[in-house]
Image (tube, rainbow, N blue to C red):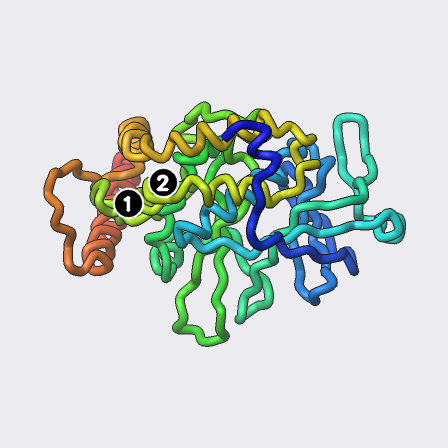
């Protein structure tokens, strides 16, 4: 698609827009996001246009979230939040910090991701110990997130939060994938393919991947994604988030569309770079998949824990001697 045709392209449903009502608190992290109550009565994590990382990270967040949702990954709903000068003046916590000290947030349109709530405590958690992590109800989706991050050139480790939608203790945690600002190489827009950097920091989430077939639902979803949908999703975020550089946008979308056919190779290369992260990966030409992958995954996790325990005991005995 040429730049001239890009400018005349009509998108479908417009992104949701909300207004900032009440500042709740500042968040941790490099982007220095803010938690804000919006006009629809919901809490949002808001990434600001003048954040220390790049203005383009706002575009990356909204664009990548739409693509991730298309391949059935669990991502929080997104919106565009309008923040006024009066709101900033009346909210002491609405500031950012840089090398030369504090500076004020800018008014205007900002990216907002709906805050994931927990039915048991009110707030979701961003860390689960391994025994609880392996019981996450949708742990298989980490394989999908891996495929997605490889396709979109994520240069930051995969982040997720976990919640329980109800107060019932027996209901397992569910994972939600957040923070897509470093997809497409953050503000530089490209695909450097830094394979180990994009993995989740607790490799146990990949223990149930027995080979490329375990990633095939997301690989096929990306390969079969219509190019028109990619263009439409890229045109929904405000153009000011990438300084109206439509030529750069067109180049990004063209390269991303072409990478749909490279996902299988990227996945194989990532596995070879980080083979220890995928201990049960076996390249096979067989098209048959196990009937009960959950049972197989549980057996594998138990075996891994026993192996780790044996190593710990052996180390302890060696130190004692």
| Residue under numbered circle 1 | 215
> Which element type, helix, strand or loop, lies under badge 2?
helix
Relative side of 79 to 268, left or right: right
Residue 65 appearing in the image: yes
Q: In which quarter of the image is residue 109?
A: top right
> Which element type, helix, strand or loop, lies under badge 1?
helix
Q: Nearer the viewer, residue 321 or 265?
A: 265
Q: In which quarter of the image is residue 152?
A: top left
**Residue 37 image point, x, y percent:** 72, 60
Q: Which of 217 and 173 is in front in this view?
A: 217
**Residue 320 image point, x, y percent:** 30, 37
Measure how far apart labels 2 and 1 are at the Cα level. 7 Å
The residue depicted at 24 percent of the width and 59 percent of the height is: 294
| Residue under numbered circle 2 | 147
* Whether residue 126 is situated above or below residue 157 in the rendered picture: below
The residue depicted at 63 percent of the width and 40 percent of the height is: 58
Quadrant where the C terminus is found in the figure: top left
Q: Nearer the viewer, residue 315 or 165?
A: 165
**Residue 175 image point, x, y percent:** 44, 56
Upstream in sequence: badge 2 or badge 1: 2
* Whether residue 263 is situated above or below residue 165 in the rendered picture: above
Kindly give the residue lying farthest to the bottom in the view shown. Answer: 168
**Mark 2 touching mark 1, by CB under 8 A?**
yes
**Residue 128 image point, x, y percent:** 45, 54
The residue depicted at 26 percent of the width and 45 percent of the height is: 216
């Amino acid at each position: 698609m040429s730049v001239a045709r890009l400018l005349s392209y009509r998108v479908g449903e417009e992104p949701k827009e909300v207004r900032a009502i009440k500042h709740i608190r500042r968040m941790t992290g490099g982007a220095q996001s803010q938690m804000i109550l919006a006009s629809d009565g919901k809490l949002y994590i808001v990434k600001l246009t003048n954040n220390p990382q790049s203005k383009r990270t706002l575009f990356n967040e909204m664009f990548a979230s739409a693509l991730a949702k298309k391949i059935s990954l669990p991502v929080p709903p997104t919106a565009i939040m309008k923040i006024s000068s009066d709101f900033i003046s009346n909210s002491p916590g609405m500031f950012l910090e840089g090398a030369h000290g504090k500076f004020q947030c800018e008014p205007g349109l900002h990216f907002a991701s709906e805050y994931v709530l927990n039915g048991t405590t009110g707030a979701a958690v961003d860390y689960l110990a391994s025994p609880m992590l392996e019981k996450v109800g949708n742990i298989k989706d980490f394989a999908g997130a891996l495929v997605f991050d490889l396709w979109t050139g994520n240069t930051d480790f995969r982040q997720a939060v976990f919640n329980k939608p109800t107060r019932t203790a027996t209901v397992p945690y569910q994972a939600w994938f957040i923070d897509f600002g470093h997809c497409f190489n953050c503000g530089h827009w490209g695909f450097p393919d830094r394979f180990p950097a994009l993995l989740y920091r607790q490799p146990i989430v990949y223990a149930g991947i027995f080979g490329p077939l375990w990633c095939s639902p997301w690989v096929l979803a990306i390969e079969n994604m219509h190019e028109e949908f990619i263009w439409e999703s890229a045109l929904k975020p405000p153009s000011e988030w990438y300084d109206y550089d439509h030529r750069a946008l067109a180049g990004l979308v063209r390269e991303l569309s072409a990478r749909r056919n490279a996902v299988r190779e990227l996945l194989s290369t990532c596995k070879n770079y980080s083979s220890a992260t995928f201990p049960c990966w076996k390249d096979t030409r067989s098209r048959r998949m196990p009937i009960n992958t959950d049972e197989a995954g549980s057996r594998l996790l138990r075996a891994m824990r026993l192996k780790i325990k044996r190593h710990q005991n052996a180390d302890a005995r060696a130190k004692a001697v």
